[in-house]
C-alpha cells in the first residue's frame, strides 16, 4: 500500500514538474517572439518538441 502511494505521488510530482517546465518554456518563447529573437525562438521551439 505504501509503495503504491509513493508511486502515485511520484507520478503526480513528475506531471507537475513537466507542466511547470512547459509553462516556463512557453513564457520564454513568448518573450523571444516579442523581442524578435529568431535564433532563440528556434532553440525554444526545438525544446518544446523534445518535451
Image (cartoon, grey):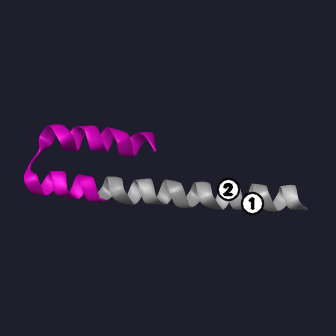
Which residue: 40% across, 42% down?
49
Q: Position of residue 24 (x, y in %)?
A: 35, 57
Please give left or right for residue 29 compared with residue 20 in the image: left
- Kindly check if marks 1 and 2 are in contact, taking CB atoms under 8 A apart as contact: yes
Magenta span dominant secondary structure: helix
* Quadrant of res 43: top left
Please give left or right for residue 8 compared with residue 38 in the image: right
Picture quarter with the N terminus: bottom right
Q: Position of residue 45 (x, y in %)?
A: 30, 43
Which residue: 75% across, 60% down?
8
Q: Position of residue 40 (x, y in %)?
A: 19, 41
Is residue 10 in the magenta section? no
* Quadrant of res 6: bottom right
Q: Residue furthest left?
A: 36
- Element under disc 1: helix
Please give left or right for residue 10 compared with residue 30 in the image: right
- Element under disc 2: helix
**Residue that numbered label 1 is attached to:** 8
Residue 28 lies, with reference to residue 49, above or below; the image says: below
Residue 37 lies, with reference to residue 24, above or below; the image says: above
Which residue: 44% across, 59% down?
20
Q: Residue furthest right?
A: 1
Q: Residues within 10 Å of mark 1 (few under 14, many from 20)?
A: few
Find the magenta span and give its range: 27-51
Of 41 and 1, which appears nearest the observer?
1
Q: Residues within 10 Å of mark 2 (few under 14, many from 20)?
A: few
Which residue: 81% across, 62% down?
5
Q: Position of residue 33 (x, y in %)?
A: 15, 53
Please give left or right for residue 26 compared with residue 41 in the image: right
**Residue that numbered label 2 is attached to:** 11
Is residue 41 in the magenta section? yes
Query: Disc 1 versus disc 2: distance between alpha carbons?
Result: 5 Å
Amino acid at each position: 500500500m505504501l509503495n503504491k502511494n509513493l508511486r502515485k505521488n511520484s507520478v503526480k510530482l513528475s506531471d507537475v514538474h513537466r507542466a511547470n517546465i512547459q509553462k516556463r518554456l512557453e513564457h520564454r518563447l513568448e518573450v523571444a517572439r516579442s523581442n524578435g529573437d529568431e535564433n532563440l525562438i528556434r532553440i525554444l521551439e526545438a525544446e518544446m518538441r523534445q518535451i
